[in-house]
Image (tube, rainbow, N blue to C red):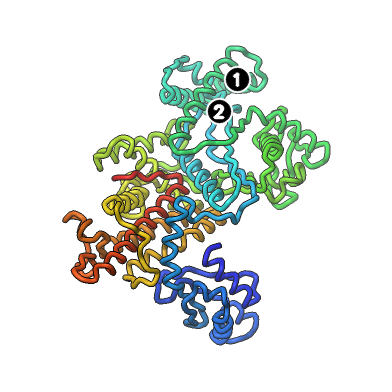
Amino acid sequence: MSIKDRIINVLTEVSGEKVVSLEFTENPNFGDYSCNIALIMAKSEGKNPRALAEEIKSKLSQSPELSKFVDKIEVAGPGFINFWLKTDVLVSNLMQIEEEKEKYGTSDSLKGQKIMFEYAHPNTHKAFHIGHLRNITTGETLARLYEANGAEVVRANYQGDVGLHIAKALWGIKRIGFDDPKDVKKRAEYLGKAYSTGSSAYEIDEKAKEEIHVINGIIYDKSDDEINKLYSETRQWSLDYFAEIYKRVYTKFDRFYFESEVYQKGKEIALEALKKGILKESEGAIIFPGSEYGLHDRVFISGKGVPTYEAKDLGLAKLQFSEYNPDKLIHTVGPEQSAYFQVIFKALEFIEPETKGREFHVPYGWVRLKEGKMSSRTGNVVLGEKILDDAKESIKKAYKTEDGVAEMIAVGAVKYSFLKTGLAQDISFDLKESISLEGNSGPYLQYTVARTNSVLAKASNKRMSEYANNIKLEIEELTVLRALSRFSEVIANAAKSYSPNLLCNYLYDLASKFNTFYAHNRILNTNDERTKDEALGPAHNRIISEEGKTKNEEVGNFRLALTAGTGQVLKNGLQLLGIDAPEKM
């Protein structure tokens, strides 16, 4: 349990309030944490908030639990209660980081829960564009955040491998001529061209439109050997290409679901729901009357007897819950599907009651370009792979780094540029900004990790554990310590609120504070001095003691531990974002 949670528990016990908010204070003059519980209670009890805060403070001061880690409690302003943590508690946290290493910051708060995250969702025969890249980055990070809090996570990917888009691609292949480039990437490019050809023809040519509908029917009923063979072969091309991208962005799925395996079951479920009166007939189609529940009506089986996306989702839910029975099933899908999911979830409450309250939609904003959001219908689409390739080439040119390191930085740069923005917000991707070593970027965090590695490598013979908990701290040191102590609560909050950006903000803040500390304090002693161009900061803080050697060694050891702790937490946080950090940069 984090220190924050321990304070909240005591506040809850003392105040009698069920919901207590405790916020980290950016300004250390106001303590480490601040609570407005007295202001809230004063309204309902008709009391003076500051006087009530003093009453609560008096009770808190008598708590044996708080005395273990809280140094002082003060009332400020109209009735805020501020808490200062004991310095030795903050310092001892470094030992915890050293002991737990990559496990530091994790918890078992979600232990016993099984969570399925469904994300990525690229359709076969279509491009894997930059929007898919944001989707897979978001879904993977949320999965890692939940795992870090003790949940059992199932990674699922639901892909459209039947439907009109497939027919358009196959029609396009027949128009431009079948060609097997053999190379996985070139096959994907060829399919993209074929799909664009078929999609454009569908919009302007009635004859082509009719032919595409015929092909679509053939795909479903498997009535033409030539079409079936072409479909199966090119479907695998897409899946092979997607697999390369998944590997590149460090994602491995536990289960792939396809429309082709759920559409028939979905149709059967829809027809059974019609018999039960859950679905209804309307103008020859079968619909769910969402309007009766404040939503909107949606078609589950068309007038031609074809199951729609809605019916397929019934079959998908049935399969997912029968196979894994998750406590939560979280769909990471764009915001345009919000109203759609509301209807699907409501229909499932009646058709598959066990899913009620267990299905969730987590939307994310568009990745926008100057010409608007992307479209693989027209061919005007930015491929996810191209974004990664461009970032990699730019990094190699800008930083003269080797291929493997450039790849690691590029993937981190692109992922971080998506994750640092709140999910609800749209993104305008800026390549130059994403690869910068300055500011709130992935490479800045990776560079800071490399900096900690460099310092520690030069002090490999030092014993970092040899320092006192009551050591006198410089303000920069205290600032870093305060930040390190918050890591576990940030992970918990980021998972709970589906907000990877909270973790990004934290990591950037920690890196910035460490680099300020690094610039103003000598970490290595005279036997381990940095080179001239590394020797930053005022002389009075450098550890080059002529006297008090033992004390200075103790301070040096502490600063090395602070450096190691920062590097470990940054690496742990980046791992949760699905980003690796090179040893050197």
Compared across the picture, whether 86 is left or right of 410 comes to right
Query: What residue type is disc 1 on?
Result: Ile
Query: What residue type is disc 2 on?
Result: His
Q: Which residue is mark 1?
A: 215
Instruction: Give x and y (percent) for residue 477.
Output: 34, 66
Q: Residue at x 56, y 79 (%)?
A: 60
Q: Secondary structure at mark 1?
A: helix
> Split into 4 quadrants, where in the image is the C terminus?
top left
Compared across the picture, whether 389 is left or right of 48 comes to left
Q: Earlier in the sequence, mark 1 or mark 2?
A: 2
Q: Which residue is mark 2?
A: 165
Q: Residue at x 56, y 43 (%)?
A: 333
Q: Which mark is residue 94?
A: none
Instruction: Give x and y (percent) for residue 75.
Output: 49, 82
> Is residue 9 shown above or below 59?
above
Q: Residue at x 78, y 37 (%)?
A: 281
Q: Secondary structure at mark 2?
A: helix
Instruction: Give x and y (percent) for residue 531.
Output: 18, 54
Dot 1: few (<14), some (14–19), or many (≥20) neighbours within 10 Å? many
Quick one: which residue is furthest to the front in this view? 550
Instruction: Give x and y (percent) for residue 368.
Output: 43, 45
